[in-house]
Image: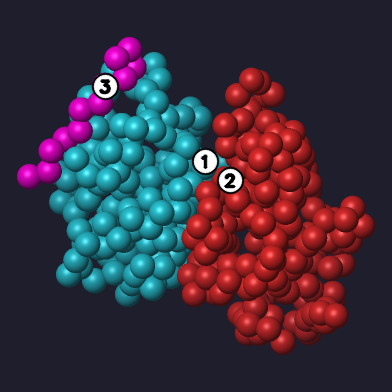
Chain colours: A red, B cyan
Amino acid sequence: MNFLEERILSDGNIKQGNILKIDNFLNHQIDVDIMRQIAYELKRRFCGVEVNKILTIEASGIAIATMLGDVYNVPVVFAKKSETANSTDDNYVSHAYSFTHKKMNKVFVSKPYLHPTDKVLIVDDFLAEGQSVHALIDLVHQAGGEVAGIGVAVEKGQQKGGATLREEGYRLESIAIIDEMNWETQEIVFRKRE
Amino acid sequence: MNFLEERILSDGNIKQGNILKIDNFLNHQIDVDIMRQIAYELKRRFCGVEVNKILTIEASGIAIATMLGDVYNVPVVFAKKSETANSTDDNYVSHAYSFTHKKMNKVFVSKPYLHPTDKVLIVDDFLAEGQSVHALIDLVHQAGGEVAGIGVAVEKGQQKGGATLREEGYRLESIAIIDEMNWETQEIVFRKRE
């Protein structure tokens, strides 16, 4: 069991409806030590892969992305969410449905911050249905850039985001993959890495 | 002229309506080196002040807050914004008017993440009217904690947020204070530190 799986077991709280609350260290209160360890672990797993930009989406991806940018020493860009953003000369715009907020968000990045020469490592705290990550991939491709890989802290393996991204041929590294969780017993089964 | 003032002069873009765009290094694309330097400069200015938690508000404060948490080695908490959050047993809730989005936001933090024993350094990227910072102060006080200080990267000195906070007796450190800016000439006048 790795450092993040251990922390999820000790601090996580499973709620009815397939919800894992780990906002005491990941996405509301932030434990900077574990953020840094996540960043180093992602860099280790993407060893040999050329990366010149980190891309995430507001808000909770920003902490991991900042640490990862620091570890790689490359710029970080966070895509913004809005219900009203339009495709203009200034912005690349994509779409992501938020299951949490039950609405379609427009996701956008100012054009000067994504380039055809970019080799982008996309990063987020959680991966479930993969809506946000697919929007970020779309933005990189609109700019003519390359997706070097996708790194996430926690993948919810019962939801289809991770499987779809792997089928599409993306290199996806999830530090913890949850295959089963039970809110009544608070048991969690993590996927074993090959 | 300090490192941040120099960077604002070289990379900033003044738009009509008293708007300073520095989203190429501060709040859309993030230059991790300058974030780290901002964090060390704030720690230097708050030398001797006891701090055991960093508090900011989503989204663009999170990068600076993460770096500052790393430099102080204390937990970071980011307050969330919502139009719908209610005061419950679970959340401390305050209010902040967003002049950018022309709406009142509820600003909240889960109760377990603010304590009576907390000595909180509040941090944000921009300070203008001070609505967000006042909401964060309110949240700390609701929890019975203490505001150790307020650190911001860029204060817009023509707007009343900074003056109000100083009058209220808070220790406010702004790395760059803009007293005048002119979108036609692109000239910026920074306040000199005493």
State which chain disc 2 sits on: A
Q: Position of residue B46 (x, y in %)?
A: 21, 62
- Viewer-side residue, B49 vs B8: B8
Q: Position of residue A38 (x, y in %)?
A: 60, 71
**What amino acid type should be assigned to the residue bearing mark 1?**
His
Mark 2 — residue?
A: A78
- Dot 2 falls on a residue whose secondary structure is strand
Of labels 3 and 1, earlier in sequence is: 1
Q: Residues within 10 Å of mark 1 (few under 14, many from 20)?
A: many
Q: Is residue A75 magenta?
A: no
Q: Is residue B165 above or below residue B36?
A: above
Reply above or below: B107 against B191.
Answer: below
- Residue B31 drawn above or below residue B101: below
Residue B117 or residue A33, whichever sits in front: A33
On the same chain, marks 3 and 1? The answer is yes
Give the residue pinned by disc 1.
B28
Q: Position of residue A136 (x, y in %)?
A: 72, 44
Identify the residue under disc 3: B187
- As shown in the figure, which amino acid type bears the numbered disc 2? Phe
Q: Is residue A64 toward the left or the right of residue B184 in the image?
A: right
Q: Residues within 10 Å of mark 3 (few under 14, many from 20)?
A: few
Instruction: Give the magenta-colored segment's residue range.
Output: B183-194
User: Does residue A137 appear left or right of residue A115 in this picture?
Assistant: right
Residue nearest the viewer, comparing B3 with B151: B3
Q: Say if labels 1 and 2 share a chain.
A: no
Q: Nearer the viewer, residue B50 or A122?
A: A122
Label 3 vs label 1, nearer the camera: 3
Gap in angstroms between the C-alphas marked 3 and 1: 23 Å
Query: Is residue B88 at all visible to an observer of this figure?
Result: no
